[in-house]
């Protein structure tokens, strides 16, 4: 599967960025970083960039807000970016989503270039043109679809990424394999997760996502398969957050993938052996979260998922390994049963 021309995998991002900017001839360039990517990633690019100004935001999901956007729009205004300017975003999914949103709305939209620096952003968030910020308790509540002018993906930045962030992002790579590439799934589970060759894996995973997004850029149908594992996964993530015991996004998604595979098994979409494979691989990488004794609280959170329609919980479920279907109505009993299954794995 090929990536389009505006998404490049690079082993020397500083050279590729310099070359790209020389071709684009932007009137002004600003670079958005967070406090970590400023220290760990920006130095590699800095001297190869044309004259530019820096915009720094605080790191973390809790800062993916309109208030942070206000700071960025303020800086863009002071730095006199015009409609022929570009914002280069060097960071993970938070900086990419927020920076992309700021650029997409500033003066009705200026170019932005994504340089993703986490595994999650390389394999997932930087592909597909969704940019947004959180609002109140809701994730990605305010946003738009807008393709970056360019996305430059380089696994060299993973060198400084903390291992828990790498493992968290890896859950989306696993999801891409489960929904669209059985061969990749077999390769992944043939070795310890840390033994993966990240550069080629990122390339592969980003291509899988691009291929899905291309079929349905505005998420009216086929793109919804990317939500596999996320209905129950998000509910679990939210439940732990509410208890003030946040878990890694990837841990919650892994748990969601196991539960939703159990539902797929109940609906005769995956076999007992496939369910066993999925359960044992994901448990070996992510362990097993201790969920509440009663499944009710998680199930209630599933009813708040924004992909639902009316009173039905709609999920993207595997249809065998390597395929998925979307908008599958799931009953309360099926959700409870899947959470009971997950709970029974706890040792
Ligand atoms: N737009 C999409 O399609 C899409 C898809 C999936 C997820 N997302 C979004 O992505 C966000 C999560 O992204 P994330 O997991 O990348 O988190 P993140 O951007 O918060 O990055 C995680 C942490 O790693 C630090 N960091 C980033 N790169 C680093 C590096 N190379 N070395 C050292 N530290 C580094 C960051 O400062 C941060 O502290 C969520 O807000 C989610 O909604 C968006």
Image: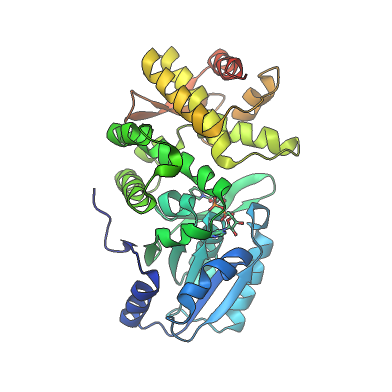
Q: The C terminus lies in which quarter of the figure?
A: top right
Whether residue 4 sits left or right of residue 338 in the image: it is left
Q: Quadrant of residue 146?
A: bottom left
The colouring scheme, among rainbow, by chain, secondary structure or one colour, is rainbow
Residue visible at 58% across and 41% down in the picture: 249
Q: Residue furthest left?
A: 1
Question: In the rendered view, would you say 200 is above or below 330?
Answer: below
Vertical order, 81 against 63 (above or below):
below
Q: Position of residue 281 (x, y in %)?
A: 45, 28
Q: Quadrant of residue 306?
A: top right
In this view of the protein, which residue sits in the foreground, 108 or 315? 315
Ligand 1's image quarter is bottom right
Image coordinates of residue 159 in percent, x first then y, are 48, 58
- In the image, 166: left or right of 219? right
Number of labels in the image equals 0
Q: Is residue 308 visible?
A: no
Q: Where 35 sits versus 255, above or below?
A: below
Q: Please, which residue is most extreme toward the right here?
A: 244
The residue closer to the viewer here, 316 or 219, is 316
Depth check, front residue: 335 or 92: 92
Viewer-proximal residue among 121 and 161:
161
Question: Which quadrant holds residue 18?
Answer: bottom left
In the image, residue 295 above or below residue 70: above
Tell me where residue 276 appears, x and y as whole percent.
43, 18
Picture residue at 62% right of the left edge, 23% below the top:
299
The image shows residue 294 at horizontal and vertical percentages of 69, 17
Q: Is residue 207 visible?
A: yes
């Amino acid at each position: 599967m090929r990536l389009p021309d505006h998404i490049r995998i690079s082993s020397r991002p500083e050279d590729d960025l310099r070359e790209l900017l020389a071709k684009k001839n932007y009137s002004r360039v600003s670079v958005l970083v967070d406090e970590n990517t400023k220290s760990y990633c920006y130095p590699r690019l800095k001297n190869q960039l044309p004259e530019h100004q820096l915009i720094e935001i605080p790191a973390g999901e809790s800062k993916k807000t309109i208030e942070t956007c206000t700071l960025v729009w303020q800086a863009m205004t002071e730095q006199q970016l015009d409609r022929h300017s570009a914002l280069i975003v060097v960071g993970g999914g938070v900086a990419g989503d927020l920076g992309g949103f700021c650029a997409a709305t500033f003066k009705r939209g200026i170019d932005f270039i994504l340089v993703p620096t986490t595994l999650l952003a390389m394999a997932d968030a930087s592909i597909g043109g969704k940019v947004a910020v959180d609002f109140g308790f809701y994730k990605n509540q305010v946003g738009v679809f807008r393709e970056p002018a360019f996305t430059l993906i380089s696994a060299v930045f993973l060198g400084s990424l903390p291992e828990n962030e790498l493992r968290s992002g890896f859950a989306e790579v696993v999801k891409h394999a489960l929904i669209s590439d059985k061969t990749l799934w077999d390769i992944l589970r043939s070795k310890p997760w840390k033994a993966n060759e990240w550069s080629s894996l990122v390339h592969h995973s980003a291509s899988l996502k691009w291929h899905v997004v291309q079929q349905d850029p505005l998420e009216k149908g086929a793109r919804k398969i990317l939500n596999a594992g996320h209905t129950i996964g998000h509910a679990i993530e939210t439940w732990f957050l509410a208890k003030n015991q946040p878990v890694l996004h990837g841990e919650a998604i892994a748990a969601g993938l196991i539960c939703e595979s159990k539902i797929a098994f109940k609906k005769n979409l995956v076999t007992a052996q496939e369910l066993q494979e999925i359960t044992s691989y994901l448990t070996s990488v992510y362990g097993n979260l201790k969920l509440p004794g009663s499944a009710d609280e998680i199930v209630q959170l599933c009813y708040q998922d924004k992909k639902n329609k009316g009173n039905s919980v709609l999920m993207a479920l595997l249809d065998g390994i390597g395929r998925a279907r979307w908008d599958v109505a799931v009953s309360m009993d099926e959700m409870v049963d899947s959470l009971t299954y997950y709970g029974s794995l706890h040792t």
